[in-house]
Amino acid sequence: MPDEPSNVDDMSLIKIPLTILLLLMCGRSEIALAARTYTNTQVPANGTAFAMGSTQSITYTVANTSTGTNSGERIYEVRFRINSGSLFNASTAAPAGWTRTSFSTTQVIFQATSWAAAIPVGSPLGFTLSIAMRTASVDATNERLRDMRARFTTTTTGPPFTRLQSVTTSTPGLWTLKSLLVTSFQITDLSGVPVSAIQAGASFQLRMSATNVSNTSRSITSNPNPPTPTKVGTVTQVLTGTSGSPLVLAAGASGTVIFTYSTASTDAGTIFFTASVQSGGTVTSTTATSGALSVASFAASIGVAPVCQYAGSNVTVTMTVINGSVLFPVTGVSPTLLLLAGAPVALVSGPTPATIASIATSSNGSFAWIYQLNSTGATNPFTFSGSASGTRNAGAVVTPTSISTPTTRRGLFVATVNPGTTNAGSNGLELTFNVTNSGCANVGGVAITFPAGWTSSGDTYSLVNIAAGTSIETWTVSGVNPVTFTAPNVAGQMPVTYSGDFNIVFSGMPAAATTSGFTVRVTDVTGAFVDLPVSVLVGAFKSGNLNDALTKSWREDFR
C-alpha cells in the first residue's frame, strides 16, 4: 500500500529532533556545572608540630564554593569528628552567629542561628576546635580529623532549616605530635637569673629545661649537643661545664641541662643558641631558640617583673647598665627603651632616674619603667629592647642593643556560654559556662553572676580538666547570685592551658526577648582575677529558634 502523502517536509523532520537535542544538551550542561562544594583551610598550616598531651586550638576556615543552580544555597551546619585518640576539648566554642548544638570528645556540631549567619558563596567562616592531643611512645607524623561535613539549605527563615544534600570531606587537616617538649631555653648568670647582657670576660649559663610528654621513660640529650651558637660581632664562648646530661625522665617528668660558658675580656657582640632535645630519631621536640646575650665592656641587661600579668595591672622594666672598665667611669648615662610593635602595654612612668651622672669602674647602674598591660595589643608574648649611652675616657660609648629575657606574657582567661541563644520562658534551661585558663597561674575559683530575670534552680555541676585526659567533678559550689565554684584542693586547681565546664540550671528566665549579659569572674591562686562578659540571646517565645530544632543534631550522637 503506498505511503500516505506527508504535509511535513524532510528537513522539518530533521530540525525537530535537533532542536530537542540542543535543548537537552544545554540542560545537561547546566546540571554538570551545578554542584554543592566547599573547601577547608587549616590554621596553623598543615604539618605543624604540637607537643603530646598539650591542648591546641586549630581553626578550619570553611568556604562555600557551590556553583550553578546551587550557588544560592548556604552552609547552615558543620560537623567535625576525630578518632585518632586525640579528643575535642569542651572549650570548643561556636563562631559568632552560630551555636554548638552537639558536643562529645569525638564529635562537635555547629549550626547557624539564622540565614544571615549561614555561609554563602564568597564569605568563608572559621571554626576553632580545641583539641587535647594524645600521647604515644614515639613521634606521630600523620594526625588528622576523621572527617568534616557541611550541610546546605535554602531556608531563609531558619532555624529550623530544610536539609539539602550534605558533603563530607574525609581526613581533613594534618599535624604532627612530638614526644618531647622544650619548656624553657634561657641564658642566665651563674646563679640562674635570666640576663640579656654581661660584662665581657664574665661567664654565663645556658639552661635547657625539657619535659617527656610521651608515655614511656626516656634518656634525653640536646640535639646538637651542645646547642648551636649564632653570633654577631665577637663572642668567644668556651664551654667549661655541662650538668644534667643526659636527662633520664619518666613519662611526664621534667629536668634541666645546664651548659656553662666563659667569654673573653675583649669580646664585643651578641650570641644566641638553637637546639632541640631527642631520645633517638623518632623521639624528638621542636627546635627552640634562646634569647640573645650581649657581651661587651659597656652593656645593658633588660628584665621585666612579673613576666606574666593581666590587663589592667602593671609590670616593672629594669635596665641594668654595666661598666666593665677597670680604668674609666662612664658619665652622663641615658637609656633608650623600645617596645615590640603591638605589645599590649602603655607607659605609666619612667625612666627613673632620667639619667645617671656616673657609673664607676666595674660597677652597675639601673633605670626603671612602669608599664600597664591592656587588652588591645595584639602581640603576645612580647619583649622590650633598648640600649644606654654615655661618655668614657672622653669618648662616646653605646651599649649593644639588648632584648628583655624571658619574654613577657599577658595572661588571659577565655569564657564562653552554650547555648548562646534560647527562647523566652524556656524554664529549666541549662547553661554551660566554659573557662579556659591561659593566665599566669592555676585557677582556683570561678564565679558566675547573672542579670535580672534569671533564677538559678540550685542544680549545678562542674567538670574541670586538671591534666591531659584527667577531669574532676569535685569543685564545691556556694552562693545564689553569683554562683561560685571553688577548687577542692591544690591538686584540683585548673592548670594553665586547661579548661573547665561550669553548669547552672535556671528555673526562671526572662519572659520577653532580650540580650542577657552574664559576668564570669575567674580568680587564680595568687588572688588576681578578671571579669569576663558573656551573653545569651533570648528570642521571643516560639520565635523560630525552637529547642526542638536542635534535636536533629543530638539524635546523631546516639543512633
Image (cartoon, rainbow, N blue to C red):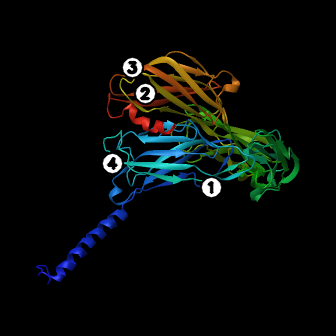
- Residue type highlighted by circle 2: Gly
Q: Looking at the figure, which quarter contains the N terminus?
A: bottom left
Which sits earlier in the primary sequence, circle 1 or circle 3?
Answer: 1
Marks 4 and 1, the one that precedes in the sequence: 1
Identify the residue position indicated by label 1 in the image. Answer: 47
Q: How many marks?
A: 4
Q: CA distance from mark 4 to mark 3?
A: 36 Å
The picture places residue 264, in percent across and down from the top left corner, at: 84, 53
Report the residue that reaches farthest toward the bottom: 2
The residue that label 2 is drawn on is 517
Q: Residue at the spot x=46%, y=31% of the render?
A: 534
Asked if marks 4 and 3 touch (Cβ < 8 Å), the reply is: no
Q: Nearer the viewer, residue 211 or 406?
A: 211
Of residues 284 and 224, the one nearer the viewer is: 284
Asked if the residue at tag 3 contacts the one at tag 1, i.e. Cβ–Cβ closer than 8 Å, the answer is: no
Looking at the image, residue 240 sits to the left or right of residue 74; the answer is: right
The correct choice, above or below, for 443 with respect to 210 in the image is above
State which tag comes first along the sequence, 4 or 2. Answer: 4
Which amino acid lies under the numbered mark 1 shown in the image of this protein?
Gly
Q: Is residue 475 left or right of residue 38?
A: right
> Which amino acid type is shown beneath numbered disc 4?
Thr
Q: Nearer the viewer, mark 1 or mark 2?
A: 1
Residues under numbered marks 2 and 3 in contact, where contact means CB atoms less than 8 Å apart: no
Q: How busy is the neighbourhood of tag 1: few (under 14 within 10 Å), some, or many (20 plus)? A: some
Q: Which mark is residue 154?
A: 4
